[in-house]
Image: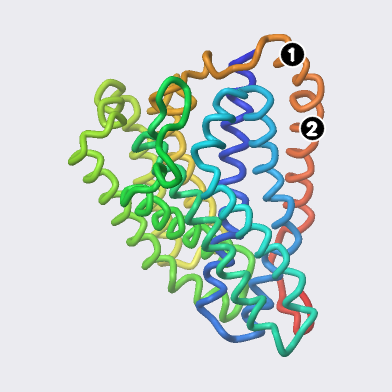
Amino acid sequence: MIAFWVTLLAISILLYVLLDGFDLGVGMLFGLTRNENNRNTMMAAVAPIWDGNETWLVVTGVILWGAFPTAYSILLSSLYLPLLVMLAGLILRGVAFEFRNKTERMRWLWDSSFILGSFAASFIQGLTVGALVEGLPIVNGQYAGGDFGWFSPFAALCGLGLCIGYGLLGACWLIKKCEGEVRERAYRLVPYLAVALLMFLAAVFAYALAENLRVIGRWLERPYLFVFPVIGALSVFVLAFSVRFRHDDVPFPMVILIFVAAFGTLAASFWPYIIPFTLTIEDAAAPQSTLAFMFWGEGLFIFPILLLYAVINFTVFRGKVQSFAEHY
């Protein structure tokens, strides 16, 4: 039963990163144009699906809270402040989504809120991953790092890196969904974002080597982990080819593969820890009776229904979008 809930937790995290990642990326790219028609087109590209994408964050929280309560309590007490900033960013961009079309004179405020909220949420998510990779100060099962023990230059670097990754994901989504100027601008952005992402990955690897982080030892102990970087490298090659020859449907799946490869590398590096390298999955799991009780609700009905909803949503709203002058 523990393996079942670990699998669902991993799937929900990955789905959130991929699905909300591209609309957070679009939100950050929103600030690179002041053309109102282009902004409306970008809104139209994510409007039917953005709120459903964020549902996977709730699913992740529920699984962590119910199936792995020890990890939930440690992570929340450790990352309370940054997670509050992330939620504030998500709320701000959600409100801006609706309010920007209800006003003319103050539209600049809601446009800025949409951009800022997207950046704040993306940065905090990357910072959180960086803090986990570097290691949180936890003593006897309790957080011992103070108000800012989660912050470090490495964590901030990871925050910026995820912003770049989400930006690349968002640009490839705009290529897939849009036409005209928005599509062409996205094509021009992809090479810059891809190079910046590769530079970030190189910097992270160099830092991990210089600081001798424990995750480096995991890579040496488990050579099979290098299959994930190989998958990522091949995806980058196909991405470059598709951008060069303007194949609209190829860039987005290739960036998804890059993210899957990165996620697979982290997950396999951390195993069997749920909080690296402090708390194992076995130690964090709730009693078997609790896991079995949750199975009949979250596991058997809610998760599959949400998955089916996502599939239907993306199927119904497939194809290119058109710009709308008044509303997305």
Q: Earlier in the sequence, mark 2 or mark 1?
A: 1
Q: For numbered disc 2, what is the local secondary structure?
A: helix
Measure the C-alpha gap from mark 2 to mark 1.
15 Å
Give the residue type that dot 1 points to. Ala
Q: Residue beneath label 2, please?
A: 302
- Foreground disc of the pair 2, 1: 1
Image height check: is 239 above or below 211? below
x, y percent for residue 116: 56, 68
- Snapshot quadrant of residue 209: top left
Asked whether the beta carbons under mark 2 and mark 1 sit within 8 Å of each other, the answer is no
Left or right: 276 as drawn, with respect to 317 = left
Seen as rendered, the residue at the extreme left is: 210
The colour style of the image is: rainbow
- Snapshot quadrant of residue 273: top left
x, y percent for residue 240: 39, 60
Quarter holding the N terminus is top right
Residue in the image at 64% along x and 36% along y: 60
Which class describes the residues within 10 Å of circle 1: few (<14), some (14-19), or many (20+)?
some
Image height check: is 137 above or below 155? above
Q: For numbered disc 1, what is the local secondary structure?
A: helix
Q: Residue beneath label 1, please?
A: 292
Give the residue type that dot 2 points to. Ile
Quarter holding the C terminus is bottom right
